[in-house]
């Protein structure tokens, strides 16, 4: 995956967050699409964040992690507020990255995933949910989770099809 050439190194605007230094040339924010990318492992990766009550939150590894604290949670709203859209002008050379081959789109299949039902009626789903292609598999997993976390309500969600952004393409 390539980082958009208009992405901005977040440390230009947020050198530290809550008193913790963020590493330079590691996290890049694209103001137009509101996407956050990481080059921490060398290969650019788009981060998805976690949905919390106040919106999406990203867990970022600190520049000099201590034994006590290795990451800091930073809300997407902070990135949007502190990095103006007018700053989306950054030369690709500034990223100091080697071009990478794009990863092919995953082949999605029909099946079931598991989510947790919140008190407000919304469903919480993992960033990377397991896809069960056999109903007995999802039933066994939902029973295991219910026994492990008593009091939590779990739901199984059936995936019948999907649409790819950039045009409607039903499968």
Image: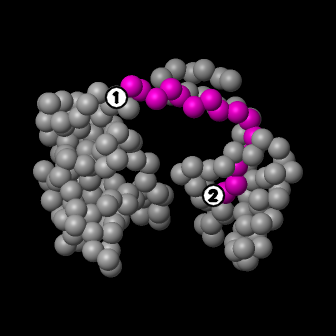
Mark positioned earlier in the residue sequence (2 or 1): 1
Instruction: Please determine whether, in this image, residue 68 is positioned above or below residue 164.
Output: below
Q: Is residue 46 left or right of residue 117?
A: left
Q: Which mark is residue 123?
A: 2
Q: Is residue 132 left or right of residue 66?
A: right
Q: Is residue 97 left or right of residue 107?
A: left
- Judged by its main secondary structure, the magenta piece is loop
Q: Which residues are drawn in magenta?
A: 101-115
State the SS at label 2: strand
Instruction: Please determine whether, in this image, residue 113 is positioned above or below residue 104.
Output: below
Dividing the image into 4 quarters, which one contains the C terminus?
top right
Image location of residue 113, percent across then percent down = 70, 49
Q: Nearer the viewer, residue 122 or 38?
A: 38
Mark 2 vs mark 1, foreground winner is 1
Image location of residue 34, percent across then percent down = 33, 43
Look at 72% across and 63% down and name the residue there.
Answer: 154
Q: Is residue 165 left or right of residue 146?
A: left
Pointer 1: what residue?
100
Residue 115 visible at all: yes
Image location of residue 89, percent across then percent down = 14, 33
Residue 38 visible at all: no
Circle 1 packing at 10 Å, graded few (<14), some (14-19), many (20+), is few
């Amino acid at each position: 995956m390539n980082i958009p050439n208009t992405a901005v190194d977040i440390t230009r605007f947020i050198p530290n967050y809550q008193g913790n230094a963020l590493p330079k040339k590691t996290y890049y924010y694209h103001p137009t699409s509101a996407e956050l990318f990481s080059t921490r492992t060398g290969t650019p990766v788009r981060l998805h964040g976690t949905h919390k009550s106040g919106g999406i939150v990203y867990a970022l590894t600190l520049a000099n992690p201590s034994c006590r604290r290795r990451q800091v949670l930073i809300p997407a709203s902070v990135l949007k507020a502190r990095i103006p859209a007018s700053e989306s002008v950054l030369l690709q050379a500034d990223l100091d990255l080697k071009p990478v081959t794009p990863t092919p789109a995953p082949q999605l299949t029909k099946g079931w995933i598991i989510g947790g039902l919140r008190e407000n009626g919304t469903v919480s789903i993992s960033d990377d949910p397991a896809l069960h292609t056999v109903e007995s598999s999802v039933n066994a997993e939902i029973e295991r989770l219910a026994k492990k976390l008593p009091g939590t309500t779990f739901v199984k969600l059936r995936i019948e099809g999907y649409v790819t952004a950039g045009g409607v393409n039903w499968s």
